[in-house]
Image (cartoon, rainbow, N blue to C red):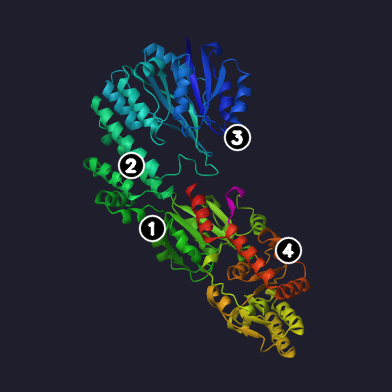
Amino acid sequence: MIAVSIIVPCFNAYSKIGRCLASLRSVDFPRDNYEVIFVDDKSTDGTYEMLRNECEKEKNWSVTQLQENSGSPSKPRNEGVKLADGEYVFYLDCDDEILPNTLENYYDHAKKTHACIVRGDLIADNGKKRTVMNKIAGWNPQLSIKERVEAIVSKQSTTITQLIKKKLLLENEIKWPEKIKMGEDTVFLVDVLVKAKNIEYLPHPTFVYNKMPAISLSTTQAYGKKELLDHLYVWKYAQNKLLSLGVDYSKIRLNIGLQAAIKSLIHNNKYDIDKDAFLEFKKTLRLFSHEIEHYNLSFRFKQIVNEVISGSYAEFTKLCRPRLLIAGHDFKFIQPAEAELCKYFSVKYDKWNGHDVHDEEESLKLLGWAEVIWCEWMLGNSVWYSKNKKSYQKLVVRMHRQELSTAYAEAIDFSNVDLVFSVSALFFERLLERFPNIPRSKARLVPNYIDAKKYDRDWHPDRLYTLGMIGILPSKKNFHAALEILKNLRLKDSRYKLFVYSKKPKELAWLARNKEEMDYFDQCESYIKENNLVDAVEFKGHCDLKKSLAENRVGFILSLSESVVELPGFESFHLAVADGFASGGVSLIKRWAGCEYIFPEEIIKNSLHDVENKVFELSNDEDAFKKMSKFGRDFLEGNYMTNEFASIVRSEVSQL
């Protein structure tokens, strides 16, 4: 019999197991006195095949694969024990790193003390720093079994920082529970502690626990009905088992488990906890209520616990959402998503009076409420929140376009910013080019959105001859080009007309003071008169586009903006294009910088003449018009729906 069997469960670990393998090759222990057993949980990414190759290089390594995926490390660990030849077993996760002297130190200590189990410390690595955890102060040889168990359960996490005698597991039929996905390490540890005759602790780290953020939520992060019910089972199981030693789990550990569960319910919720699961939650908390009332819970957590114990399912579901504070001077690009965001967050707004003007007292009050802060526009609001947010709060900034022409971002403390969202691919790169103080690792491309299903799409043949422009200010929107297209089309068919959904130039004070801009729009007005377009152009102002476009029978939305290559650029997304398709029409773009990364090439034209010809072509082919309109709507629904936007936001925030 050899001394130790290291058991390593693996699943789809091809890209993350490298450090683990390197650490195993650095183990300072006689090769003929330990083995490494990899148990693959039916990976689909080539992990098993890679491990077979690696095991051929190491005489004391082996790998086996389960017939089907089990969904947790428990079954692979149990299979590993069956194959183990060691006197002791040591469990190691495939993304962690065993320390070179762990086996030597722990095995020697186990032999000297005749230990059934030796617990130890671990080093947690979050990608920024390493911290020693699981230390137990005051451990000494005079401690009783009860005192040793209390020290381990109360002072340590239940992770696998342990060397365990295999005979103890086999004789007592102790296995990792395979039916639960959360808390299985607690059940296993409790079973071992209850049966162990000699429990030891060594104040020495066993391995490095890598807890760097993942690209997406893992099954151990996402938290819902199954995870909650597993935890409820584990808490009651641990309580009943440990009472046989005179140890009260609810007094020494449940406080930590309950807070971890509530935190997961708030920040990693799968939103599938039904009334039956809630009822079980209520029963469990009532069972432990005599201890829970003495826990030092935050006010936020106490609210949730009280609603559970009182049986208020509706209030419970409302409270189990992160508190999202949206701050900025203009909410037109974020408020339409409020209903979808409220499925995942409790939302409040901090309305600023300008780019850097706000009621600081009100902002501070709202800041005290928030858990996640969303700065809409990367302006003075982002500067203030980056300097005032608390360490436990998450800060997200969304940049549109105008921010690139300001210096606000130069004053933002990006060490306090978690994510920066850009709405299009071109402006993602321009953001990083303009502000090199933004770490690329914190930048994300999260496109704008549209709720296409809420638009009226009533059909009328007049749509084939009705053009529209949504926003004509400033002059770079190229209103004059739309008038030229209209004039040329009317030479072919007098039914063509143009609806303008925008304020007039004189209605904006900053624009009215700009002589160059006003000269441009004076020319547009003259062009309308000189070309007999007065009755063919109608200004509608700002309307509810979801209804107005169909009511006014608009068929074509034109996006004719100048293509500005220099910073800051001009169009970052142009939602008007989406409005056109959502309302049952067709949108056409005269190519501007970056549009090809946002919309399909089929609607992008290289010249005004090409746009004009496409309008005329579709005007004379109703079937082709409707086919193009449906193509556009399908594209929106596949790429820019509001529910998908909210889901992406939730996913990104959950991983912080």
- Of mark 3 and mark 2, the one earlier in the sequence is 3
Is 187 placed above or below 4 here?
below
Mark 1 or 3, nearer chain start: 3
Q: Position of residue 289 (x, y in %)?
A: 23, 43
Q: For residue 369, which numbered disc appears in the image?
A: 1
Q: Are marks 4 and 1 in contact (CB under 8 Å)?
A: no
Quadrant of residue 248 in the image? top left
> In this rendering, does residue 137 appear at all?
no
- Determine whether, in the image, residue 624 is placed left or right of residue 357: right
**Mark sitting on residue 45:** 3
Real-space Cα distance between discs 3 and 2? Answer: 35 Å
The extreme left residue here reads 290
Other residues around mark 4 within 10 Å, as few (<14) / some (14–19) / many (≥20): few
**Magenta stretch containing residue 444, yes or no?**
yes
Closer mark to the observer between disc 3 and disc 2: 3
Task: Give the spatial CA distance, label 4 vs label 1.
Answer: 42 Å
Foreground residue, 447 or 292? Answer: 447
Type of amino acid under label 1: Trp
Cβ atoms at labels 1 and 2 below 8 Å apart: no
- Distance between the alpha carbons at the discs numbered 2 and 4: 54 Å
Which segment is the magenta one? 440-446
Q: Which residue is mark 2?
A: 258
Q: Secondary structure at mark 3?
A: loop
Q: Is residue 479 magenta?
A: no
Q: Is residue 94 left or right of residue 249?
A: right
Whole-number angstrom distance, CA of label 1 to CA of label 2: 22 Å
Name the residue located 60 percent from the left edge and 34 percent from the top edge: 45
